[in-house]
Amino acid sequence: MAPSGPVQAGRLDAGLAVLRGWGLEPVVYPHVRDVGEVPYLAADDGGRASDVEEAWCDASIAAVLSARGGFGAQRIVELLDWERMARAGPKVFVGFSDATALHEAIAARLGLATLYGPMVAAEAFVTDAATQEHLRATLFAPESVQALSPRTARTLIGGRAAGVTVGGCLTLLTTDLGTPSARSTAAGGILLLEDVAVDPYELDRGLTQLARAGVLDEVAGIAVGSFSGYEPYDDLGAVLVARLGPLGVPVVDELGFGHSPSSLTIPLGVPCVLDADARTLTFELPALAAARG
């Protein structure tokens, strides 16, 4: 389903072909290929919400995968029948970027873990074999990807911490504040953060907003995926150290999830250990078992 922006047909077809190659039978919901009254939305709010809810409540559907990000998921959160979705039982949900609004809502209203991973029509999923393989492994052999140690990872603040993964796209986390689904704190958790094409002052603004709102109070550790789209990247790293260093918790950068050419799938709502000195993120449970409640 496409809870946010319109989908490029060619990319969607290519992504569906990858899923079929795994032996899956992808079901494209009715409004996925539509364009809404405004060009940045895939169908109108009611149509996008209907696709999400019907996919979730269909007992024959094992997982609900986002087609792409963009903008629009926030607009449908309050249109979903969460009581009906709760009665339908656990479901695997996959998406990143704008899907952060749905990750947060599913956590708050259903109490379920989710997978912060590539969208079916996203460029990285269609073009990058490593992105495809990590999602495939997470779905079919989650015990094989419980320990993450990408070569790109670097230590910003040393230390070791344990907690449950929370978070997502920085822009969505900040704009979600004050809504019924927003978490008031990440206390005791490992906060995952990523975004795309943010200037240093925008990164500073987002982190400052989280801090002022109390979200960062007593956080156990922070894992940064990617803040791609701005150069030189060291300018962003300096902001991360300046704003997160005073928290006194471990911080690892460039863990390779989110908006990056090659993207890992990261479980949200799963207990893990962040070792900033070793630059590793290790999950204590296989992702899929946790995602299914």
Image: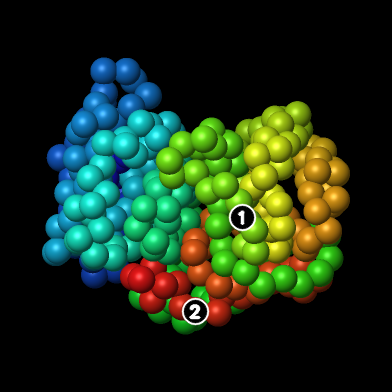
* Image colouring: rainbow
Q: Is residue 50 left or right of residue 228?
A: left
Determine the image quadrant of residue 221.
bottom right
- Secondary structure under tag 2 reads loop
Neighbour tally class for label 2: few under 14, some 14-19, many 20 plus, Cα within 10 Å = some
Q: Residue at the spot x=23%, y=52% of the render?
A: 83
The relative height of residue 175 versus residue 89 in the rendered view (above or below) is above
Residue 92 visible at all:
yes
Q: Position of residue 167 (x, y in %)?
A: 56, 52
Question: Dividing the picture into quarters, in which one does residue 74 lie?
Answer: top left
Which residue is under mark 2?
285
Element carrying mark 1: loop
Identify the mark nearer the N-term, 1 or 2.
Answer: 1
The answer for how far apart the CA atoms under marks 1 and 2 are is: 20 Å
Counting other residues with Cα less than 10 Å from the Cα at mark 1, is it few (<14), some (14-19), or many (20 or more)?
many
Comparing 183 with 172, the one in front is 183
Q: Position of residue 211 (x, y in %)?
A: 71, 42
- Residue 265 appearing in the image: no
Find residue 186 and name its label.
1
Left/right placement of residue 25 relative to residue 129 reads: left
Depth check: give the residue in front, 226 or 202: 202
- Image spot of residue 53 (x, y percent): 22, 47
